Amino acid sequence: MKTSKTLALLLALTLVLALCAAPAAHADEKTELIVFAAASMTETLTELKDKYEAANPGITITYNFDSSGTLKTQIQEGADCDLFISAAPKQMNQLDAAKDKDLNPDGLDFVLSDSRINLLENKVALVVPEGNPKKIESFDRLVELLKAGDVFFAMGNSDVPVGQYTQKILAYYELNEEGLAKAGLITYGSNVKEVTTQVKEASVDCGVVYGTDAFSAGLEVVDTATKEMCGQVIYPAAVMKNSTHIEAAQAFLDYLTGDEAMAVFEGVGFSKAA
């Protein structure tokens, strides 16, 4: 009888301890935010991740950096994503049900209403490798060399924003991209980091990247495209409708618009979107 009472007491004590421990274990759990962001934001967002996590110990941030076109496709195909930051409005528009059929031809509905903002503005820059062997000093000079068939030029693919901006520059100068590529004067990168690397390694004579990537890679910028040449380089950001952490994602997006984050962005050449 005594043994039975002892066992019952031990079982009751074990149950109490388990119930007491449960809230503590739950309190230790962290919320993982999955952020898809344009490759050109790698350095700045990595720095801001450390700052944000230090101030918010219940949050961990996992990034997926790539071209905005690739990220858009991954989201469309069902990848987990709480917050998307694109290097151009086009890819965000294609996920936003608030946009008409011309901008969102597939009628996709991934963007959370009222969360979308224009976060940053960047610049499109013409960069050269160390020493600038071809003595390229401007877009005008690049055009002369392309027409003469005397330059090897790197640009982004047509499905990534930096490539699309470059296509607009070529069109502005009335250049035939397809003909130049067939002549062996153009090489492509699947995102802006690949173009940056080609210039950094001097495997090309010049390339078009964002001003922020030129800064981070220590590349010489010899010219910057005007609004008339390729439009504004706007980075929209939005919480995704299927996020499982909508409030936390919105809080991080709010942080990215604040003074601390903007100081980091502006330090490499971004500016706050007007």
Image (cartoon, rainbow, N blue to C red):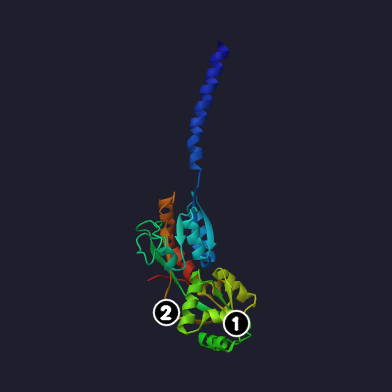
Quarter of the image with the C terminus in it? bottom left
Q: For numbered disc 2, what is the local secondary structure?
A: helix
| Front in this rendered view, residue 77 or 264 | 77
**Residue carrying label 1:** 183
Residue 44: x %, y % from top left:
52, 65
Q: How far is the residue under mark 1 from the one under mark 2?
A: 29 Å
Instruction: Place residue 195 in its image quadrant.
Output: bottom right
Disc 1 residue crowd, few under 14, some 14–19, many 20+, Cα 10 Å: few
Q: For numbered disc 1, what is the local secondary structure?
A: loop
Q: Is residue 82 above or below residue 200?
A: above
* Circle 1 or circle 2, nearest the eye: 1
Pointer 1 or 2: first along the chain: 1
Residue 37: x %, y % from top left:
49, 62
Looking at the image, can residue 257 be seen? no
Single out the residue that lies furthest toward the top.
Answer: 1
Q: Which mark is residue 96?
A: none
Q: Is residue 58 above or below residue 102?
A: above
Residue 272: x %, y % from top left:
41, 70
**Residue carrying label 2:** 227
Residue type of the residue flagged with mark 1: Ala
Residue at 50% in and 77% down? 166
Residue at 49% in and 77% down? 167
Residue type of the residue flagged with mark 2: Lys
Quarter of the image with the N terminus in it? top right
Residue 207: x %, y % from top left:
56, 78
Residue at 55% in and 17% down? 6
Q: Is residue 149 above or below residue 196?
A: below
Looking at the image, can residue 20 be seen? yes
